[in-house]
Amino acid sequence: MFNSLSERLNSTLRAISGKGRISEENIKETLREVRMALLEADVALPVVKIFVEEVKQRALGQEISKSLNPGQAFIKIVNDQLTEAMGQANDALNLNVQPPAVILMAGLQGAGKTTTVAKLARYLKEREKKKVLVASVDIYRPAAIKQLETLATEVDAIFFPSESSQNPVDIAKNAIKFGRKQFADVVIIDTAGRLAIDEEMMTELSAVHQAINPVETLFIVDSMTGQDAANTAKAFHEQLPLTGIILTKADGDARGGAALSIRQITGKPIKFIGMGEKTDALEPFHPDRIASQILGMGDVLSLIEDVERKVDKSKAEKLAKKISKGQGFDLEDFRDQLVQMKSMGGLTSLMGKMPGMGAIPEAAKNKMNDKSTMYMEAMINSMTPKERHFPKLIKGSRKKRIAAGSGTSIQEVNKLLKQFTQMQKMMRKMSGKGGMKKMMRSMQGMMPPGGAGGMPPFR
């Protein structure tokens, strides 16, 4: 997400970073470029106007901190303004009510609403330790009810059955009653999708809302529709009292206009962001972290949270003990690292959260992608256990067999072995005295100038 906006803003801001002082003259061109970058990202024009004016006033009126050069100070102003435009901080769900807390989900057809219901159920179950019940009042599409039933099984949520012959209000009321009997903490009600703001269906949705009085009414919107997403959410809010927004398909949106427009146009917070098709691809929306990613500063907090939540700690401890005893790091260990990385959203997701990635050329970033890690895993799987433990055995005919078995080439097998050797050397550095310090120095040497996010030299 935000790839094109991030690239454009970064190149624009780099031009001012070396200026001796910030004046109206030398930021005029920069602000024009910022304005163009936001418009190209499909940010709504009123939002762009407010954004540029606020940045200009703060840049010219601010007393520049002595610890920062003027260019850095200007980038901080842009960062703060991006954060403010998107809502300052994450606005969590209000679940502090007598159970079950009722959440009503609404949205246009094709926005990924039913999938988002399942994603939210999984999020609440795994991270908030809640017992969740889901139900659908979409009596117009029996396939949607069946889809929700299948997804409920996948995410281990209670499913309340409904049929097209029933009344939506009755389904919603009965689902909540059933949720109480099951001691559910949260009940999520999925509603019928709309191709547009349809008066008849909006009346029906309002009736459901009035009957169940949900603690949260969330609007699910496709981020790829840009500023139209904000305008649709605003029109919906005029018919229904929304409490928040969930942005879907953000992984396919290179612009980011929806995220930057919605808060100011609707006055409603973005509570979650969907970053993929799988049911675990839903994250709380943190404006400060998103702003940091847009400006190429990474998102270290989210990276740490991913590691804490998704890394297999027993495997990590086992590998650490193995290395500390001086035992070799082999291709099985290397494959485990690739699998762990995949569980954290893959290389592309990790790169987006690492500080300094904005300074790496786009061509270099494109070479580091999830497809390459998938092929690497396939090549290791095509090896025998003995080859994984003793990589030096892999010569001519073995390379040919591994390439054929993994659908790759001998050149790609050679590249994998070279990357493995580099990783092995890094692991050897860790096993010796002061190993972690040595490894950190090596990693700093691999970063582009200024790419360590201002991190001091490791001593």
Image (tube, rainbow, N blue to C red):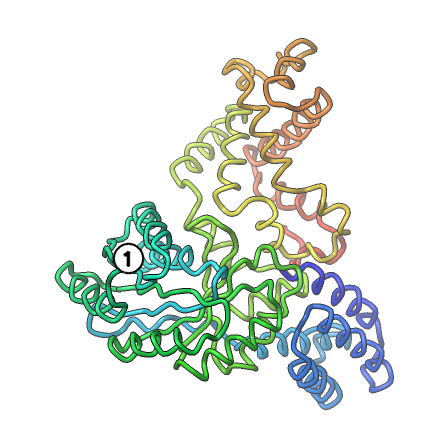
Looking at the image, residue 176 sits to the left or right of residue 208; the answer is left
Query: Residue 285: in sight, yes or no?
Result: no
Is 405 situated above or below 346? above
- Image location of residue 314, percent across then percent down: 38, 37
Looking at the image, residue 42 sits to the left or right of residue 156; the answer is right
- Image location of residue 14, percent across then percent down: 79, 66
Kindly indicate the quadrant of the structure image that contains residue 424.
top right
Question: In the image, what residue type sits under mark 1?
Answer: Lys
Kindly indicate the quadrant of the structure image that contains residue 292.
bottom right
- Image location of residue 342, percent across then percent down: 52, 41
Which residue is depicted at the point 26% across and 64% down? 186
Q: Say which residue label 1 marks.
A: 129
Residue 227 versus residue 53: which sits nearer the camera? Answer: 227
Which residue is depicted at the point 63% across and 15% down? 392
Which residue is depicted at the point 71% across and 49% down? 447
Residue 428 versus residue 185: which sits nearer the camera? Answer: 185
